[in-house]
Amino acid sequence: MADLADLTLTEAGAGLRAGEFTSRDLLEAVTKRASATEAHLHAYLTLDHEGAERAAEAADESFAKGEDIGPVQGIPIALKDNMCTLGVETTASSKILDGWKPPYDATAVARLKEAGAVITGKTNLDEFAMGSSTENSAYGATRNPWNTDRVPGGSSGGSAAVAAVGSAFGSFGSDTGGSIRQPAALTGVVGMKPTYGIVSRYGLIAFASSLDQIGPLSRSVEDSVLLLETVSGFDPRDATSINAPVPNFGGSLDTGVKGMRIGVVTEFMGEGIDPQIISATRAMADRLQDAGAEVVEISLPSTEYALSAYYLIAPAECSSNLARFDGVRYGYRAEVEGTTEDMMARSRAEGFGPEVIRRILLGTYALSAGYYDAFYGQAQRVRTLVRNEFSAAYEQVDALVSPTTPTTAFEMGEKTADPISMYYSDLCTIPSNLAGDPAISVPIGLDDADLPIGFQVMAPALGEEVMYRVAAEVERLADFTARAFLATSEVMSP
Amino acid sequence: MTVWEAVIGIETHVELSTISKMFCSCPVDVEEEPNTACCPVCLALPGALPVPNEKAIEGIVKIGLALDCEINESSLFYRKNYFYPDLPKNYQISQYTFPVCEHGKLDVDVDGTTKTIGITRVHMEEDTGKSTHVGDGGGRIHDANYTLLDFNRAGIPLVEVVSEPDIRSAEQARAYGAELQRIVLALGVSDAKLEAGSMRFDVNVSVRPIGQEEFGTRTETKNVNSLRSVQRTIEFEIDRQIKVLEAGGEVHLETRHWNEDTGVTTSMRTKEESEDYRYFQDPDLLPLEVTAGWQDEIRASIPELPAARRARFIDAGTDVVTAGVLVDGPDLGVLFEQALAQGASGRSVGIWLTGEVVAYTRRKEISVSQTPLTAAHLVELTEMVDEGKLSSSAAKEVLISVLDGDGPPSAVAEARDLLQVSDTGAIEAAIDQVLAENAEAVDKVRSGDMKPFGFLVGQVMRRMGGRADPTIVQQLLRSRTSP
C-alpha cells in the first residue's frame, strides 16, 4: 500500500468508510511523516500526541458503531497556533504567550472536534500572524518543503508546510492580507480565505479584526470545501459573524467554466510580478477560455493603493488588539523594580518581537490625534474605493483571477532586513481582505527553480460556490501532481 | 468689582443593573468573591470577542427617551485606548461619533424656578475592573506596595450622560444630579447607588465675568460620589477659581480630585499631559441598529417619570415640597396614589404622609412598606379629622398607634377614647355646670369684657376630658354668654 500520508483528505475519508484503514492508521502515518520531516521543516510548534490518540480512538469506535458524522471524522488535521485550543499551548509564535494554555476552544476548533476531527497539533506562524515568511517566529523559522533554503511563505507557513508534506491531511490558517493564500502558493497547496463573517473569529487571536478570517489549506480543492464546510456558519459569540445559512460551497465543483465570464486583473499582470508567474497565469487563463469561459481583462486601478491602505488599517487595529498583552493577567511578565506601568512596558518590550513592535508603533501613530485623518481615515476611504471597484467588476464578470504572489518562494533571510519588500509579497492577496470577499490559491505548476506557482481565484462576497467552481476547473486543467521534495526524498525512509 | 458667573457641565456615569454584562454573559454582581464573575471575554483573553447585550441597549434608550433625546437608528462603538491594569483589554469599548442618544434636555427646579439643562449625549460603554492599591500611598497607585485586581466589575454596562455647560450654580448642579438619579430609579434601569459608585459624577467648572460670552478655563473634578459632594465641590471650585483670577492668576485646564474629608479639590494632572485615546471604530462590532419599531416598543415600556408624577400630585392638592417628598419615597407615593383612588383629600393625606409617617419611619429606621399602614387607614384617618371626630393632636396619636400595628384608626380612637364629642347635649350639660361655677367670669363676659372667655372654654374642654370639638364648644358658649 502506498504511504497513507500521501492521500488527500477526501481519499482518506473514503478509505476510512471502506474499512481499508482506521483513523489510528492515518494518525500513525502523519506522525511518522512529521517525525521524518520536522527536523528539516519546523512546521509544528506543538504536537498533541495524547489528544490526537484519544480523538482517533474515539473516531474508530464511532465508525465501528456505524456512525458517520461528516467528512473530517477521524481525519488528522493541524491548526495554526493562533487558534485557541482548550488545554493545549497556544502562543501565536510569541514569547509573550509562552506556555499559555487557553481555558477554551475557538469556535472553529470546537466545530472540528464536534465533527470528529483528530487535531494533530499547532503549527508555526509569523508572530501574531504578522509576516509573509514564517521567519518572524519567537520559536524559529519554518522552511519550505520544496527547498529548505527557501521560506514557506507566511504567516500560515507551518500550516502550509504540513499540508504540503503530508504531516496532516489538511490544516487551518488565518488570512489577514494573504496569510493563507500566499504560503499555499509558495508550498504548492490549495489555500482559501472565506468571505468575511463566514467562519467565526471567536478564539482566533486577533491581528486585525476587520480583515482576519480562518480558512483551510489542503491538497485538493474538494478537500478545501470539506474543511470549510466543517467550520463555517453563524456563531453568536462573534458579532461580525454572518447570521444566514452558509452557501453550498461545493455544489458546482464538477460543472466546469463553460459560459462563465472570468476577469484577469490587469494590475497584477505586469510590473512587479515575476515574468514566469505572469506567463503561467496567462497560460491558465487561456486554458480557461479554451474550456468555455469568456476571459476578459479587468482593470482595478485602486489596487495600487490597497497595499498602503492595508499597512495602515492592519497595524492600527493590531496596535489596539495587542494592547491586552501587558503581563498583568496572563503570559510573559518582565521582572522589574518599579511601577506597574514599568512592568507593563517592559513585559511588552521584551515579549514582542521586532516586527510586532514595528506594526504596533505604525498603528499607534496612524491613530494619533492630528494624524488620524491623514492616515487611518484616508486608508478607510481607499478601502471603500477598493470594495466599490470590486463590486463594479463583479457586475461584469463572475470571478476574477490573478497570480497569488509576485514571486515564488524566496530565500530564507532574503527580505528580513527590508520590511517593505516583504510587505510586497501580499500585493495580489490584500484586495480581497479589504473587500471582505472570498479568494483561493490553486497550484498550477513549477518555475525554473522547481518552486510552485499559485493561481488566485476571487469571487464576490458569499460567492464561494462560484470561486470553487473555477478553482476546481483550474485544478483539473493544471493537473499539478508534483510533490514537495521533502515528501519524496530519502529522509522519508529512516 | 467684577461679578462672576459659574459655568458648569456634568458627566454622569450610571451602571445598568442588567442580568449579564455588556459584552458577555457573566452576571452583573460585584458582591461575588473577587474574580469569579468573569470569563474569557471580560478578562480579555486572547481570541475573545464582544457581543452587545440587548437589555443594556434597551436601558440606555429608556434613559435617552426620558431625557428627551433623539435616538440614532444606527450608532457606532469605538475603542478608547489607554493602558491601565484594571482595564483588561487596555481599551474601553465606548462611543464617540454617533452615540445612541443625542440632543436632549432635563428640567430642574431650584427655589421655585425651572431651569432647562441641555443633554449633549447619552452613550454606551463598559465599566473597568476594580483596583485596590495596598501600601502607604493612601490608595494611590504610584505609592502602592502591591495592587489587587477584581474583574467582576469589568464589562458591566455603563451609560454616560453628558450635560451641556448650562448649569450656573452648585444648587442647580445638585438638583440636576438628584433629578437624574430619580429618573434612572423610576426607569428601573439602575440601582443608582451613589455611595456604592453605581452612579457617579465628573463635574466641569469654570467662571467668567457676568456678561462675557466666552467660557473661562475649566477644571474637571472626577468621581464625585454624592449629591452633597457635587454641591460642595462646585462651591469650592467656584470660590477657588474666582480667588485665583482676582489675584491676577490663571485657572489651569486640569483634572482635580475632591477630598471629602478636607473639603477641597486638589490637582491630579494637567490636561496637557492627558492621554490621546486614539479613538477608532471597534472592528469587532457592527453598527448598533435601534430601529424606529424597537424605539416605539421601548417608549411604551417607560413608566410615568418623576416630573409628571409631581405635577399630578400637585394637581391633587399637595404643595410642591410635599409632592417632591412623595415622589422621592417610592412607598410613600404608592400609598398616596391608593389613598387618592379611594377618595381621600390629596392635601391632607400628603401632609400626614410626609409629616408624621416619614418622622415615624426615620425614628424606627424602617421603610413605610414595613409598617402595617394602608391607604384605607389614611382615608379613614383624614375623614375622621375632616368630620370633626378627631382633633389633630388625637389624630397624630392614632396614626402612631396604627403604625405600631394596633389596628385601623377608628378602632384605635375608640379603644383609646380619643373620639371627639360633637354631641351638643353633653357639651350643653358641661357648659351649664361651668356657667354655674364661674358666675363672676360669666358676668364679665356678658358685660363685654371678653378676657375670661378663653378661660371658660378651657373649663368646658377640661370637663369634657379634652374630647369635645372646640369649635362647637366656642359656638355654644358664645350664644350662652351673649348679653
Image (cartoon, rainbow, N blue to C red):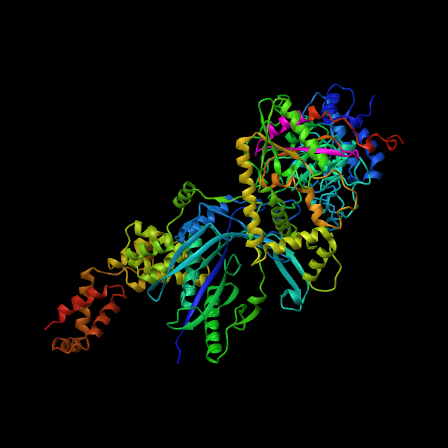
- The vertical placement of A229 against A273, above or below, is above
**Position of A152 compared to A492: left or right?**
left
**Residue A258: % across, % down:** 60, 22
* Total numbered labels placed on residues in the image: 0
Residue A9 forms part of the magenta stretch: no
**Residue A393: % across, % down:** 55, 34
Most extreme residue toward the left, as rendered?
B483
Most extreme residue toward the right, as rendered?
A494
Taking depth in this image into account, of B342 and A154 the one nearest to the observer is: A154
Residue A212, image quadrant: top right
Q: Quadrant of the N terminus of chain A?
A: top right
Does the rendering let one see residue A199? no
Q: Which residues are magenta?
A: A447-474
Taking depth in this image into account, of B30 and A343 the one nearest to the observer is: A343
Residue A452 forms part of the magenta stretch: yes
Q: Quadrant of the C terminus of chain A?
A: top right
**Position of A169 compared to B455: left or right?**
right
Does the rendering let one see residue B215? yes
Give the residue drawn at x 43%, y 62%: B362
- The vertical placement of B415 against B462, above or below, is above
**Residue A98: % across, % down:** 75, 48
Taking depth in this image into account, of A378 and A403 the one nearest to the observer is: A403
Give the residue drawn at x 61%, y 36%: A266
Residue A220, image quadrant: top right
**Position of B456 compared to A238: left or right?**
left
**Position of B475 compared to A270: left or right?**
left
- The vertical placement of B260 against A383, above or below, is below
